[in-house]
Amino acid sequence: MRHLTFAANWKMHIAPAEARAFASAFLAQSNPVEGRTLWFFPSAVSLEAAANAFGGRADVRIGAQDVHWEAKGAFTGATSIPLAHGAGATGALVGHSERRHVFGESDEETGRKVAALLAAGLTAMLCVGEQLSEREAGQTQAVCLRQLRAGLGGMGQDQWGQVVIAYEPVWAIGTGRNATPGDAASVHAAIRAELGRLGAPGRRPVLYGGSVNQGNVASLLAESEIDGVLVGGASLDPAGWARIVATG
Ligand code: 13P
């Protein structure tokens, strides 16, 4: 049976009270579907409210948008894995393009974060993707595979079950432009081949992100290489998100 993952990245939106209101509206319109997993990535301040509000529905997972690799210490403003886990997170995004390109996160830092998440028993959703100039220079696959190798370099071979990949071309995020389903599928195939070379024992989920919405989600999911979607703007409205997760 095909497994699909629908991940909502709420970015710097949705305060705790709004997370509770979102969950009650969403849960009233969306029932669990066999073979589908839903991830919500709220801001750190809304993690606990979201975890409580979704009430442990079996298909729902809550994750942090970013974590530090150190378990504790003097890192003002950062969220450690134990802090996120204590608030209800069972995973985290790592290396989102906004972390890489707005906050200057390096490939090496993504590797440390993935390794720390996996060691703590949590899921790492590693994001990879090329910028427009890199795409135009024909470097799409080289960039994505480099980010993949750096992100997964510190992991153990027994930890593959905790790894999810999201391909998000930077030029498609929040711009209304997205990769064609065929273009995305060919990058997914290259990512999947690299995962195999790195030792992944079976199929790992590879999600697509970047201007996914109600109008284009079905054509993306029609590609067998695309195991789900990671969505920003179109995940902020509970009714719209309920329609997206019911697609296909
Ligand atoms: P948009 O869906 O708003 O383009 O954002 C994509 C994204 O960055 C999800 O992580």
Image: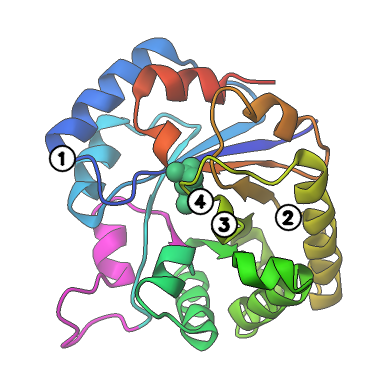
- The answer to whether the beta carbon of the residue marked 3 is less than 8 Å from any atom of ligand 1 is no
Q: Quadrant of residue 167?
A: bottom right
- The residue under label 3 is which amino acid type? Trp
**Could you tell whether 245 is left or right of 188 in the image?**
left
User: Residue at (64%, 28%) from the top-left corner?
Assistant: 216
**Could you tell whether 113 is left or right of 209 in the image?**
left
Query: Which comes sooner in the sequence, label 1 or label 2?
Result: 1
Q: Is residue 32 visible?
A: no
Secondary structure state at the residue bearing disc 1: helix
Residue 16 disc label: 1
- The answer to whether the beta carbon of the residue marked 4 is less than 8 Å from any atom of ligand 1 is yes
Secondary structure state at the residue bearing disc 3: helix
Q: Nearer the viewer, mark 4 or mark 2?
A: 4
Query: Which comes sooner in the sequence, label 4 or label 2?
Result: 4
- The residue under label 2 is which amino acid type? Arg
Residue 204 disc label: 2
Labels 3 & 4 near each other (Cβ < 8 A):
yes
Q: Is residue 83 above or below residue 43?
A: below
- The residue under label 1 is which amino acid type? Pro
Q: What whole-number distance in Å separates the C-alpha atoms at marks 3 and 4? A: 6 Å
Looking at the picture, tell me which residue is in the foreground, 100 or 122: 100
Q: Position of residue 35 (x, y in %)?
A: 67, 30
User: Residue at (24%, 54%) from the top-left corner?
Assistant: 87
Labels 3 & 1 near each other (Cβ < 8 A):
no
Q: Quadrant of residue 204?
A: bottom right
Secondary structure state at the residue bearing disc 2: loop
**Could you tell whether 21 is left or right of 220 in the image?**
left
Q: Which residue is mark 3?
A: 171
